[in-house]
Amino acid sequence: MQDSFSYSLSRVNAFKGLASPAYIALASNDPMVFSLALSKELMDLAFVEKEFKNEYFRLAEQCRSFSVSLLGLCWSDAEVRVILNGNTVDNNKRNSIQ
């Protein structure tokens, strides 16, 4: 049986993997939504699991930085809109073909 510290430690380690920019980019359908939602969840956990508060804050900031970096890769306003609103360009093309 695990004690509560061991459980908390394995939980923070799992979140380290989830907050990895590589994991977010490759494993999520919408990296922007995933990273911002994960950031919110990590901030909430920082107030619950006080012994790892600083680590959760750091991971939340890492997720927010990933989101900002993703937007920084955009070359135009249209690309920013696609990232923030979903891929509406493809949806519009499909609707006009039908």
Image: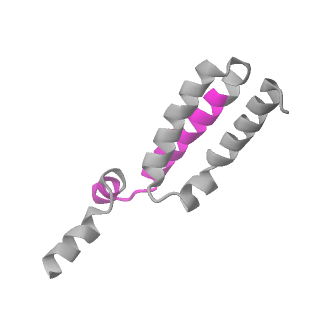
Residue depicted at 24% across the width and 68% down the height: 91
Residue depicted at 48% across the width and 47% down the height: 34
Could you say where residue 67 lies in the image, as x and y percent from the top left? 48, 45
- Asked if 16 appears above or below 74 in the picture, the reply is above
Q: State the residue lying farthest toward the bottom.
A: 97
- Asked if 1 appears above or below 91 in the picture, the reply is above
Could you say where residue 18 lies in the image, as x and y percent from the top left? 63, 47
Asked whether residue 50 is drawn in magenta, I would say no
- Asked if 15 appears above or below 81 in the picture, the reply is above
Residue 72 horizontal side relative to residue 27, left or right: left
Asked whether residue 62 is drawn in magenta, I would say yes
Q: Which residues are magenta?
A: 56-82
Q: Main secondary structure of the magenta part?
A: helix
Question: Which residue occupies the foreground of this view, 73 or 64?
Answer: 64
Could you say where residue 17 lies in the image, as x and y percent from the top left? 68, 47
Picture quadrant of residue 44: top right
Residue depicted at 44% across the width and 49% down the height: 32
- Image quarter where the C terminus lies is bottom left
Question: Which residue occupies the foreground of this view, 43 or 1?
Answer: 1
- Image quarter where the N terminus lies is top right
